[in-house]
Image (spheres, helix red, strand yellow):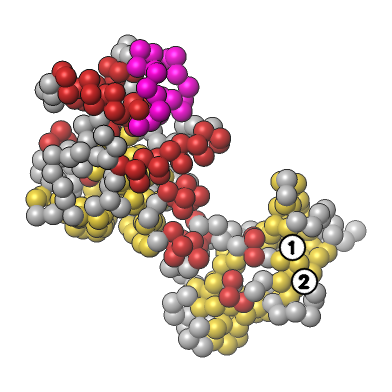
């Protein structure tokens, strides 16, 4: 048995304007989303954006304030958690310390009244899927964090759920284990034909495992798209900032067309690529540190940068520097630099994403100039 066996198939999970209020706070605010059978969708955003609350609503752990959840033609938000046939993997593993690995995996099946012979078969299969076949008699305290998370995944897999719900499953693991488990989760998803709704605050994690990413802010969807779309073409400056465009800087607009924008400010001029309408006298430029490259001062989008801090990171230097007026810009380079250096850099025009100025723009810091003595 290598692929998932289910009690019923489905085509689509639909969230129809679901909301969850806690008093006056709208933790989830009219979120609509469709998840196709076999798809891996990541809900991505910072702490407090509503992603875990949304997942809890889908699981039935948190009741909706408004909206509906449908599985094809069947409404499921009115069903208790145990009747939704969804598997849940929690951030803190939620294993019973007094039960062996095998008993932990069997627990959900036993609660459902599954026959003992079927329970044994399912436990053996689930543990083999997460590569823990030899650990069935161990207790959680005898396992590493990564192994405990594998047990939690096996427990969710054992009932052959229609949908896997995963809430920050890797956040308690160290960096190497996170990488290993990230690959493991993606492998299981593909091998078993799972449908997965996955919550994370880690952009790199979402990019590496998901077929589609939904970026949330304050309980609302900011952007939905493939990893490539969200990474390369953020819909607004909030998504750009969250997806690694660390330099979010306001400029004056000197000229603009449907796709190209001229910018001026902070002692430099730039040309960028408009995302959405840019009609005002100012706009926000989003630039990845990786896109700030060394070049001669006469090339397009060239400007001087005075290095104020630098960190050695193996193959690259991560550094920050000041524009002529003191505005800070973050950059990366394979060339070794040190504080006090002034370097000529440039940014390709198609890598300067320009957005309308709005309240989502989190401007990069500006440091006050120290008067010369």
Viewed as shown, does residue 250 lie left or right of 94? right
At 29% from the left edge and 44% from the top edge, which residue is drawn?
Answer: 194
At 16% from the left edge and 47% from the top edge, which residue is drawn?
Answer: 9
Along the line of sight, the residue nearer the viewer: 292 or 284: 292
At 71% from the left edge and 46% from the top edge, which residue is drawn?
Answer: 313
Along the line of sight, the residue nearer the viewer: 60 or 121: 121
For the residues labelled 1 and 2, the Cα–Cα distance comes to 17 Å
Residue that mark 1 sits on: 322
Could you tell me residue 206's position as x and y percent?
Answer: 44, 50
Q: Is residue 139 magenta?
A: yes
Res 205 visible: yes
User: Is 164 located above or below residue 150 in the figure?
Assistant: below
**Category of crowding for the residue at label 2, using alpha-carbon neighbours closer than 10 angstroms: few (below 14), some (14–19), many (at least 20):** some
Count of numbered labels shown in the rendering: 2
Viewed as shown, does residue 88 lie left or right of 372? left
Along the line of sight, the residue nearer the viewer: 237 or 150: 150
| Magenta-highlighted residues | 129-150
Assign a secondary structure to mark 2.
loop
Could you tell me residue 104's position as x and y percent?
Answer: 29, 20
Could you tell me residue 89's position as x and y percent?
Answer: 32, 34
Residue that mark 2 sits on: 295
Could you tell me residue 322's position as x and y percent?
Answer: 74, 63
At 42% from the left edge and 48% from the top edge, which residue is drawn?
Answer: 209
Residue 57, picture quadrant? top left
Viewed as shown, does residue 114 lie left or right of 351? left
Along the line of sight, the residue nearer the viewer: 281 or 148: 148
Looking at the rendered image, the quarter that the C terminus falls into is: bottom right
């Amino acid at each position: 048995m290598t692929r998932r066996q289910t009690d019923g198939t489905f085509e689509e999970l639909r969230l129809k304007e679901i909301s969850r209020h806690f008093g006056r706070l709208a933790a989830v605010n009219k979120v609509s989303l469709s998840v196709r059978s076999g798809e891996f969708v990541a809900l991505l955003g910072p702490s407090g954006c509503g992603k875990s609350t949304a997942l809890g609503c889908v699981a039935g752990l948190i009741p909706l304030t408004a909206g509906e959840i449908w599985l094809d033609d069947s409404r499921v938000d009115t069903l208790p958690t145990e009747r939704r046939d969804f598997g849940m993997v929690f951030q803190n593993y939620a294993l019973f310390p007094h039960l062996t690995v095998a008993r932990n995996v069997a627990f959900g099946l036993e609660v459902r009244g599954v026959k003992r012979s079927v329970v044994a078969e399912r436990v053996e299969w689930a543990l083999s899927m997460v590569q823990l076949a030899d650990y069935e008699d161990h207790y959680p305290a005898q396992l590493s964090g990564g192994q405990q998370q594998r047990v939690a995944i096996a427990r969710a897999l054992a009932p052959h759920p229609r949908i896997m719900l995963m809430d920050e499953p890797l956040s308690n693991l160290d960096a190497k284990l996170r990488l290993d488990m990230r690959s493991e989760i993606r492998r299981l998803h593909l091998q078993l034909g799972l449908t997965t709704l996955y919550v994370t605050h880690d952009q790199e994690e979402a990019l590496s495992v998901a077929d589609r990413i939904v970026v949330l802010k304050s309980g609302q969807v900011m952007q939905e798209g493939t990893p490539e779309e969200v990474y390369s073409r953020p819909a607004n400056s909030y998504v750009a900032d969250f997806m690694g465009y660390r330099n979010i800087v306001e400029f004056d607009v000197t000229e603009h067309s449907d796709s190209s924008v001229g910018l001026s400010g902070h002692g430099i001029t730039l040309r960028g690529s408009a995302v959405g309408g840019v009609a005002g006298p100012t706009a926000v430029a989003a630039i990845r540190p990786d896109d700030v490259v060394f070049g001669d001062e006469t090339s397009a989008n060239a400007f001087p940068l005075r290095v104020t801090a630098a960190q050695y990171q193996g193959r690259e230097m991560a550094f920050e520097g000041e524009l002529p007026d003191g505005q800070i810009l973050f950059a990366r380079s394979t060339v070794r630099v040190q504080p006090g250096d002034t370097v000529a850099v440039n940014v390709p025009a198609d890598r300067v994403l320009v957005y309308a100025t709005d309240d989502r723009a989190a401007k990069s810091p500006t440091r006050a100039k120290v008067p010369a003595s």
